[in-house]
Image (cartoon, rainbow, N blue to C red):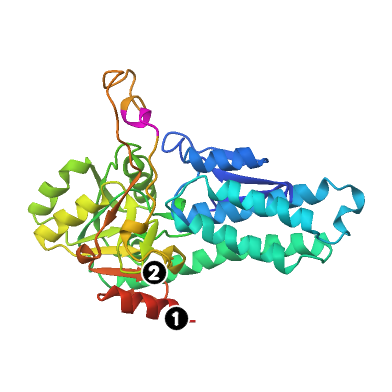
């Protein structure tokens, strides 16, 4: 299942994305040309999903570098990359990286792009810009290959006819192809397998309702939408044989940061003896975070709870809101972490380190 949700436009002077805020009622592409537009697209979740954010950031960086080079005039393409240009790109790196703090793929992709700038410093700008474009495309292609590899591994953990449950959205829209947590379901469907998937709404922004149910239904996968607080009764009936979620950052000990509500789902799964699988590329693993306590948790606008998706406010105006976008699931609740390099199992300190060491 292909999903060209991020691409260059007009010869690389613009980047377009599928506007995820408009789904499922409208399929809209946004064309972005400025740093402010790119950062806003990340902040307001027009593009979301840790791998997709990283891909988009790389494409944006390459596009904005091209604009910066063009501003030097006709001879700008032939001029060597100097310290001033490198400084401007470093500022752009930081500007985009600060848009969302939890998903590590964003900074990981920007670090790769900044590395290309430094490597080609002193060379003609045309060469550097070509290298940046190639690096952005490589990041996207690597993610597509990772998604396929994870889908194959995840498919080996489940059986035809199983009931599955997922949280938030980690499908093609959130990546480049297949997705992470939805990958086994979509690949299995392509091969004639049948699953029944429970997709929870994922409050407060309803990514499960708006995006996951949309993607699964579009792919012909049998899907039932439930509210977040219905997961327990669904599992208690024996209708779920496995949980699959994506994630935004994995600590060195296997603690996992994912969309708010993931931890609660893992606790319910533990109670009912349902295996809980986390799927992510190795770019999502942050060995600089020893445990989940070291992962920064983004806190978002209270109006996402009070007013968004409602015709009228659903709480008194003076009531305070706490709106963390993510929570941390303790590694003890995670059955396995599926990466493109293999399946990591406890003890995670050892298995994660081994996965990262593989070439």
Q: Nearer the viewer, mark 1 or mark 2?
A: 1
Furthest-left residue in view?
Answer: 237
Q: What's the CA distance linking mark 1 and mark 2? A: 17 Å
Mark number displayed over residue 357? 1
> Left of 343 or right of it: where is 275?
left
Residue 202 lies, with reference to residue 303, above or below; the image says below
**Badge 1 vs badge 2, beta-carbon distance below 8 Å:** no
Q: Which residue is mark 2?
A: 150
Residue 162 place in picture, x, y as percent:
20, 62
Q: Is residue 357 visible?
A: yes
Q: Could you classify mark 2 by the number of other residues whose Cα lies within 10 Å: few (under 14), some (14-19), or many (20 or more)?
A: many
Whichever of callouts 1 and 2 sits on the residue coming sooner in the sequence is 2
What secondary structure is the stretch in magenta mostly built from?
helix
351 and 17: which is toward the camera: 351
Does residue 118 appear left or right of residue 264 in this picture?
A: right
> Which residue does the image show at 78% across and 53% down from the upper left?
84
Range shown magenta? 301-305
Mark 1 is surrounded, within 10 Å at the Cα level, by few (under 14), some (14 to 19) or many (20 or more) other residues, namely few
């Amino acid at each position: 299942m292909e999903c060209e949700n991020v691409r260059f436009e007009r010869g690389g002077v613009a980047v377009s994305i599928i506007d995820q805020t408009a789904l499922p009622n409208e399929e809209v592409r946004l064309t972005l040309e400025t740093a402010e537009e790119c950062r806003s697209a990340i902040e307001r979740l027009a593009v979301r999903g840790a791998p997709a954010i990283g891909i988009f950031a790389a494409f944006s960086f390459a596009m904005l570098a091209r604009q910066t080079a063009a501003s030097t005039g006709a001879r700008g393409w032939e001029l060597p990359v100097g310290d001033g240009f490198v400084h401007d790109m470093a500022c752009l790196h930081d500007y985009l990286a600060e848009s969302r703090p939890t998903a590590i793929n964003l900074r990981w992709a920007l670090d790769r792009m900044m590395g290309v700038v430094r490597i080609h410093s002193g060379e003609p700008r045309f060469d550097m810009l070509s290298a940046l474009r190639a690096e952005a495309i490589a990041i996207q292609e690597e993610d597509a290959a990772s998604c396929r590899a994870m889908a194959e591994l995840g498919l080996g953990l489940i059986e035809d006819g199983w009931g599955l449950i997922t949280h938030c959205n980690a499908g093609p829209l959130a990546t480049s192809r297949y997705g992470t947590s939805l990958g086994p379901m979509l690949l299995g469907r392509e091969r004639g397998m049948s699953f029944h998937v429970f997709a929870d709404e994922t409050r407060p922004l309803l990514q499960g309702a708006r995006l996951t149910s949309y993607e699964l239904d579009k792919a012909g996968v049998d899907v039932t939408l439930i509210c977040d607080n219905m997961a327990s009764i669904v599992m208690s009936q024996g209708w779920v044989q496995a949980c699959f979620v994506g994630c935004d950052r994995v600590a060195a000990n296997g603690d996992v940061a994912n969309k708010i509500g993931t931890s609660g789902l893992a606790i319910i799964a533990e109670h009912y003896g349902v295996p809980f699988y986390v799927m992510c590329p190795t770019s999502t693993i942050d060995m600089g975070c020893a445990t989940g306590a070291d992962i920064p948790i983004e806190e978002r606008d209270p109006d996402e709870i009070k007013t968004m998706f409602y015709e009228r406010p659903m709480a008194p105006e003076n009531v305070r809101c706490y709106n963390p976008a993510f929570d941390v699931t303790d590694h003890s609740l995670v059955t396995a972490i599926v990466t493109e390099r293999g399946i990591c199992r406890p003890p995670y300190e050892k298995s994660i380190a081994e996965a990262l060491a593989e070439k």
